[in-house]
Amino acid sequence: MRINLVDDELIRYIADTINWIPTFNPDRKEHITGLCYWGGNRIIDNNGADKLSDVLKGSISIFSTANDNVELKGALITDEDEVYGEYELIRYKKYELIEILSMLLSLVERVQKEEKILLHMGV
């Protein structure tokens, strides 16, 4: 099963919790945590899948309490001359967020049951 697109903004929004996930960098042959945001590969095995499952379930639970229209705080946007800027607003329908996270969760559960790996190929 291959999932091609999960918005970068959504991944960045939950990035702090994703950084708790143990992963393996096959390019450097090192065990680390989190994903690579600039094109490097990461492998998530059963150990990482267990934690990722918990993170996704928690995120689903949190977003389930949201209004039907969800606004998430994105990146800070500034002009070159400005010291201050505004945060980008990322808009979703609640059902879209739940659907995306549930799809990822079902993939992680498959990794757990079938003792497979999950390959992340950069954001």
Image (cartoon, rainbow, N blue to C red):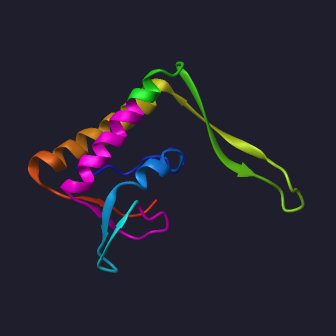
Q: Report the residue that reaches farthest toward the bottom.
A: 28
Percent x, y for residue 93?
51, 26
Q: Report the residue that reaches farthest toward the left.
A: 114
Residue shown at 41% from the left, 35% from the top:
59
Which quadrant of the structure image shows residue 31? Answer: bottom left
Q: Report the residue that reaches farthest toward the right.
A: 81
Residue shown at 43% from the left, 47% from the top:
6
Residue closer to the observer: 59 or 122:
59
Residue closer to the observer: 26 or 95:
26
Which quadrant of the structure image shows residue 41? Answer: bottom left
Number of numbered discs overlaid on the protein picture: 0
Percent x, y for residue 103?
31, 38
Which quadrant of the structure image shows residue 36? Answer: bottom left
Residue 27 relative to residue 110: left or right: right
Q: In this view, does 59 lie above or below 46?
A: above
Q: In this view, does 106 lie above or below 52?
A: above
Percent x, y for residue 104?
31, 42
Q: In this view, does 20 lie above or below 101?
A: below
Residue 120 relative to residue 63: left or right: left
Is residue 75 within the magenta segment? no
Residue shown at 39% from the left, 31% from the top:
60
Residue 119 relative to residue 99: left or right: left
Is residue 47 within the magenta segment? yes
Report the magenta residues as a range: 35-60
Percent x, y for residue 86?
78, 44
Residue shown at 45% from the left, 28% from the top:
62
